[in-house]
């Protein structure tokens, strides 16, 4: 009974809410089935078997982070998400996921050691010490990854991406800002948003291009330390070994003259100050209450609010509008000539031409 911690009372009244957890431990909340005759019972306990009580205890401590924990156990992100499809309570979804893991793990794998390691990686070391006293491994071994990303590789990146720039990293990887906002809306935790973004991106890339594209995105987002760790994790000693990629290289826009893509809006927003936001938005033709709403919904960091404002403005423009010319004029009006000059130089270098000179 030490696994369920200490009872606060000598007697627990029937029907009290506190009994629910203990009923789950003993399976009393599950429909009973007719016991098999003793002669028909076949009992095979896998190596280091994780019992129901342990699963219940871990599930109660995971809270909303249970989906990423499933990936640490070796499950795919897409499979983990299936347990949440029916809108069950968090602990029930976590229990179902862990029961699935236990039922499908290879019989020659030590379940307790695997679960203990996953808890440590998930920053639940104290729980691991309580459940697996004497089994906690001080040196966690990380296996070298391959030349593309599996879900655990993406979780490694997720664990090390700062919460602030994750949306901009998505744009640098080639995702649309509108799709990134949908991911944010559908996931409560920032970490789950990052994981969903990375999986969504990975699932639309060729295996041979995944490492180069990620290296390029991390460099553009100035996550150089993480780029180095990812590169080393996948067996590359330096940048020269990573095959160049075509993503985010100069391409001539086809929508019209001076067209600005999401990645171009990130370039502008990275250079704007918070004090520029209101005036810049007003010159874009937005109402002040709309600017305030964007600032409230998308900042901090303020750069995300700037991107949202610019993307929203662009989506409202007619096809023939020269985005570059309009933005350059507004930058002059708000006395940010420095950004205007940088933008025009950036645009010329990227697309090989300049269509706005104001």
Image (cartoon, rainbow, N blue to C red):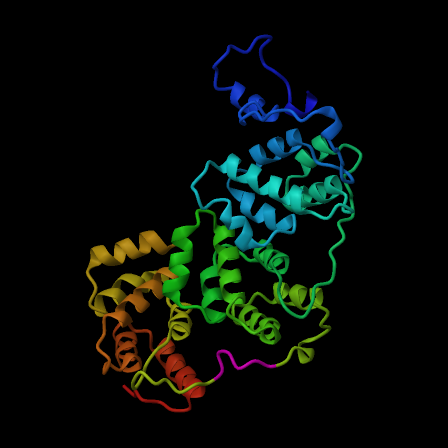
Left or right: residue 248 versus residue 108 is left
- Position of residue 180 measured from the top left corner of the image (x, y, whole percent): 41, 61
Q: Where is 198 relative to 329, above or below?
A: above
Q: Is any part of residue 140 visible from this angle?
A: yes
Q: Residue furthest right?
A: 134
- Position of residue 34 measured from the top left corner of the image (x, y, whole percent): 60, 25
- Position of residue 268 measured from the top left corner of the image (x, y, whole percent): 38, 72
Q: Where is 90 relative to 237, above or below?
A: above
- Viewer-nearest residue: 132 or 94: 94
- The magenta region covers 244-249
Instruction: Give the position of the C terminus as an image quadrant.
Output: bottom left
Identify the residue at image location x=33%, y=61%: 275
Q: Where is 242 relative to 149, above or below?
A: below
- Position of residue 345 measured from the top left corner of the image (x, y, whole percent): 41, 85
Most common SS among magenta residues: loop
- Viewer-nearest residue: 165 or 207: 207
Q: Is residue 185 magenta?
A: no
- Viewer-nearest residue: 259 or 208: 208
Q: Where is 166 relative to 26, above or below?
A: below
């Amino acid at each position: 009974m030490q696994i369920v911690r200490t009872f606060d009372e000598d007697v627990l009244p029937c029907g009290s809410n506190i009994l629910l957890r203990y009923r789950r431990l003993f399976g009393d909340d599950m429909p009973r089935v007719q016991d098999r005759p003793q002669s028909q019972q076949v009992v095979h306990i896998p190596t280091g078997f994780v019992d129901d009580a342990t699963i219940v205890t871990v599930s109660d401590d995971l809270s909303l982070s249970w989906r990423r924990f499933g990936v640490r156990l070796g499950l795919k992100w897409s499979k983990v998400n299936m347990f949440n499809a029916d809108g069950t309570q968090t602990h029930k979804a976590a229990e179902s996921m862990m029961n699935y893991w236990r039922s499908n793990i290879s019989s020659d794998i030590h379940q307790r050691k695997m679960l203990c390691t996953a808890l440590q990686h998930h920053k639940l070391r104290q729980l691991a010490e309580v459940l697996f006293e004497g089994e906690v491994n001080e040196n966690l071994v990380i296996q070298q990854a391959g030349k593309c990303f599996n879900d655990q590789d993406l979780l490694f990146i997720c664990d090390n991406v700062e919460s602030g720039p994750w949306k901009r990293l998505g744009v640098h990887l080639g995702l649309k800002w509108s799709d990134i906002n949908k991911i944010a809306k559908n996931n409560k935790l920032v970490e789950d948003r990052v994981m969903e973004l990375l999986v969504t991106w990975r699932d639309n890339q060729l295996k041979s291009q995944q490492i180069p594209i990620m290296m390029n995105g991390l460099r553009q987002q100035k996550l150089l330390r993480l780029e180095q760790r990812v590169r080393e994790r996948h067996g590359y000693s330096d940048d020269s070994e990573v095959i160049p990629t075509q993503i985010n290289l100069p391409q001539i826009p086809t929508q019209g003259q001076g067209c600005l893509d999401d990645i171009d809006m990130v370039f502008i927003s990275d250079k704007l100050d918070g004090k520029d936001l209101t005036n810049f938005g007003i010159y874009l033709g937005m109402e002040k209450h709309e600017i305030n709403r964007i600032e409230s919904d998308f900042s901090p960091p303020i750069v995300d609010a700037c991107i949202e404002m610019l993307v929203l403005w662009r989506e409202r423009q007619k096809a023939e509008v020269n985005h570059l010319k309009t933005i350059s004029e507004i930058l002059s009006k708000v006395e940010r000539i420095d950004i205007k000059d940088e933008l025009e130089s950036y645009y010329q270098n990227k697309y090989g031409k300049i269509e706005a000179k104001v």
